[in-house]
Structures are given as C-alpha cells and as structure tokens.
Amino acid sequence: MKFSRMFSMAKKDVVIITRETFFLYMVAMPIVMSLVLTAALGSVGTAKPSLAIYGEDELVSILEEEPSLNVTIFSSEESLREAVLEGEYDGGLLVSPTPKLLISGKSLSNERVTIGATLANVFREVSGKEETVLFETKVIGTDKDPWKVRLVPFLTIFAVLVAGMIISASLIEEREKKTLNAVLVTPITPLEVIMAKALFGLFLGLILGTIILVLNGALTSGFLLITLFLILGTTFIVALGLMAGVMMDNITDLITRIKIFGVILYFPALVIMFPQIPQWLGKFFPTYYFIDPIFSITQKGAGWSDVWWKAVILLACDVVVLALAAKVLRKRMLGKKIKA
C-alpha cells in the first residue's frame, strides 16, 4: 500500500467536490442550519457569561471592567434572584455581608467555569492574598440544558453524516460513469481506494464537525478529548458511507435509504434534545458513543476517566464497520452483486 497513491486519489476527490454544485450545497447546508438556528436562539459563537451583581464593594467596580464578563448592577436582591432563577443571567453575585454566588440552572458548564475563575481572581486581587479564595455557591432554577445546547449533538451528527453521504455519492457516481473501473486498471489497489475515500471523508467530517462546535460555542475545553471522539465518530459514519456507496444502485436509492434509516443514527441526538425520552435507550445505538461524550465534555466538564469506556466501544464499532466496508467493496470490485 502506497500512501502517495492514496493521497493522490483523495486529492482528486477534493478537486471534484469543489466543482460540483450538489456537493458544495451538501457541505454548506449544516453550516447554514447551525447559523440560522443558533442566531434564532441567540447563541452564535462564544458569548461572554452574564453576571448580575447586588451590593457595594471595591470588587464591584473591578468586575465592571472585567473583559471576560457582561456585568449588570441590580438595585435589589429580590430582582437579582428572580433574574438568575429565570435564566436571564448566568450567575448572580450578592456582595455583602458575605459574598454569595448564585448560578442559574440554565447556564452552561463553560459559563460557570468562567464566572467562578474570574471571581476567584478578583477576590484575590482585592484581598491581596495568593491562596485560593472560597465563597458560597448555589445553583438555583431548573438544571436543564437550554435548546441552544440540546441542538448541538443533532447538528454535529448531521454535519458528519454529510461527509459520509458525500463519500457514498462519490462512489456511486464513479461506478455509474465507470471511472472506478478505470482507476482499478492502474496500479492502485482496492485497499488503497478504500483508504483514500476514508481519508477524504474523515477530513471533511472533522472540518464540518469542528465548525459546528465552534459556531455553537462548544469547543471551549477538553479539545484533545473532543478531537478524539470526532475522529472515532467520523470514522464510523464514513465507513457506513463507503458501504452505502458500494451497495446502493444510484443517488436516488441512497437518499431514500438515508431517509428511512437515518433515524437510527440521529436517535441518540433526539434523546438529548428531548429529556423526556428515557436516556438509557440511546445506549443501544452506536452514535450514542460518539455524540454523548462530546456533549458531556463540552457541557458538563467530563474528563477521560468519565468517557474512556465509550471511546473503547466506539473504536470497536469502527473496526467492525471498516472491516465490513472493505469486504463489500472488494466483492463489488471483483464484479459480484451486493444485496442492499
């Protein structure tokens, strides 16, 4: 297996996709969807956390100048509590007599971390002490993820699925135009064809998935862990795309099957979107082990010790699906009929 031939074929696919209007439309669609939905929900990019403050103290004036927070001064404790309870502010600080931080149950994990770290730094600056500053913290209101958060898993799966679909469509088009047969006359091997297609799909899926996470302000911590699950999840989707591209007879057949069976891939995202669905149901679907860890890392601050077993399961799914993809593609190249 020569990497130069693989990269040459992958480069060819990149050139083709930039020339085809349909492929460009598919690539742009998840990005446009994300922009429209997040703009409608008021959450494009990584907005600064909002902090309500009641009380008079030296640290209030310092916090007003703090660039990492949007600070609003309240005239009464009651109005501050109500605003934080309703989720209008990510947090509320009661300055006196003893500093107390109220955290909205609707705030995001990265917003809570930013508020806590900023307050700790300001308290140290005011007191002139270097040791860790502790203050009372209480979460108020329903600890329920807002829609702008629950939509991220769906948009991420959709973006990666687009990469898998493009691989499928590319294979189908090459089979219909007989260009795949012409390629196989050259020294390139079936395995190199598989790897080249997978490499292109992995690159495209990673780019689209990362863009979606950035647009929704979800790529703020745990970057390496998120990247790992993006790679494993995209590999799984791309392997399915390879099989679909080999087994489907035409583009119409491919789109029809995606409409019918796509819910299997989307179901874990639907479970996150609608908490009233029993959460354990999502564990029966492979994409759960792709999207749930990303959700847990970005919104709940999960670490490797919390998600390692999901990475193992997802890796096993990748190995199985890649092996099946290689098998069906080899059969197709040998002229055997594949039953879809």
Image (cartoon, helix red, strand yellow):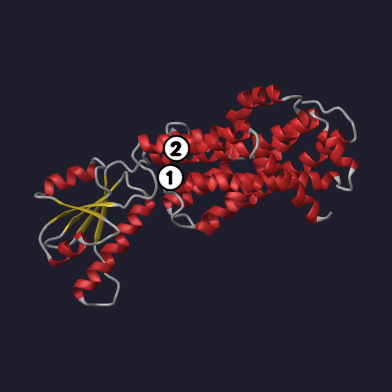
Tell me if mark 1 has few (under 14), some (14-19) or many (20+) residues whose alpha carbon lies within 10 angstroms of its own: many
Q: Can residue 178 be seen at all in this image of the molecule?
A: yes
Q: Nearer the viewer, residue 61 or 272?
A: 61
Quote the CA–CA distance across marks 1 and 2.
9 Å
Disc on res. 151: 2
In this rendering, is residue 10 above or below 244?
Answer: below
Give percent across and percent down for residue 175: 80, 31
Using residue 239 as the reference point, say whether residue 128 is left or right of it.
left
Q: Nearer the viewer, residue 93 or 169?
A: 169
Residue at 13% in and 67% down = 58
Mark 1 belongs to which amino acid? Asn
In this rendering, is residue 82 above or below 125?
Answer: above
Residue at 43% in and 45% down = 216
Q: Nearer the viewer, residue 279 or 170?
A: 170
Mark 2 belongs to which amino acid? Leu
Give percent across and percent down for residue 301: 43, 55
How many labels were placed on the picture? 2
Q: Dot 2: what SS?
A: helix
Q: Dot 1: what SS?
A: loop
Q: Nearer the viewer, residue 130 or 182?
A: 182
Q: Can residue 317 be seen at all in this image of the molecule?
A: no
Residue named by callout 1: 216
